[in-house]
Image (cartoon, rainbow, N blue to C red):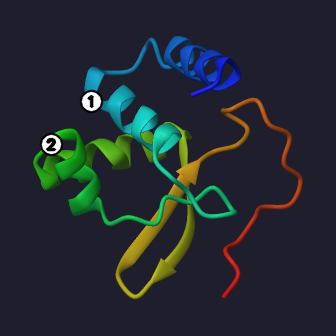
Amino acid sequence: MDNDAKQKNLELLEKTAGMTANQRLVVMLYALHPTDRSGAVLETAANLAKLVGMAPPVFSRTRKQVIEAGWLEETERLGHIRYYRLDPKRMGENVVIPLRRAT
């Protein structure tokens, strides 16, 4: 990881200081996990929960709180699976047109 990426992650930790530990873990997971071109994390909630050692219901509830706090936005829905990305505005990026994954 280069120094710019490390600095960005440290800034993200600072911005999330008022959140619970689980909420911060979800935000950092979305910040660090591989994404598609639109920034979406293309992984199921169950797999993400397993990755961070959270029970799936706890992960889903925490992710919902993070969404409601404006940190994650839905990018796509395939059947009953929803994909999310960190809100670029929270990351300090100026995005005029929301990106969508090419189909």
Where does label 2 land, which residue?
54
Q: Position of residue 78 (x, y in %)?
A: 45, 84
Determine whether, in the image, residue 102 is placed left or right of residue 36: right
The residue under the point 84% across, 48% down is: 95
Of callouts 1 and 2, the N-terminal one: 1
- The reply to whether the C-beta atoms of the residues labelled 1 and 2 are less than 8 Å apart is yes
Crowd band around label 1 with a 10 angstrom C-alpha radius: few (<14), some (14–19), many (20+):
some
Q: What kind of residue is marked 2?
A: Met
SS for callout 1: helix
SS for callout 2: loop
Q: Nearer the viewer, residue 3 or 44?
A: 3
The residue under the point 70% across, 43% down is: 88
Q: Nearer the viewer, residue 37 or 18?
A: 37
- Distance, label 1 to label 2, CA atoms, is 9 Å
The numbered dot on residue 22 is: 1
Would you identify the image quadrant in which residue 87 lies?
Answer: top right
Crowd band around label 2 with a 10 angstrom C-alpha radius: few (<14), some (14–19), many (20+):
some
| Figure quadrant of the C terminus | bottom right
The residue under the point 49% across, 17% down is: 13
The residue furthest left is: 55
Q: What kind of residue is marked 1?
A: Asn
| Figure quadrant of the N terminus | top right
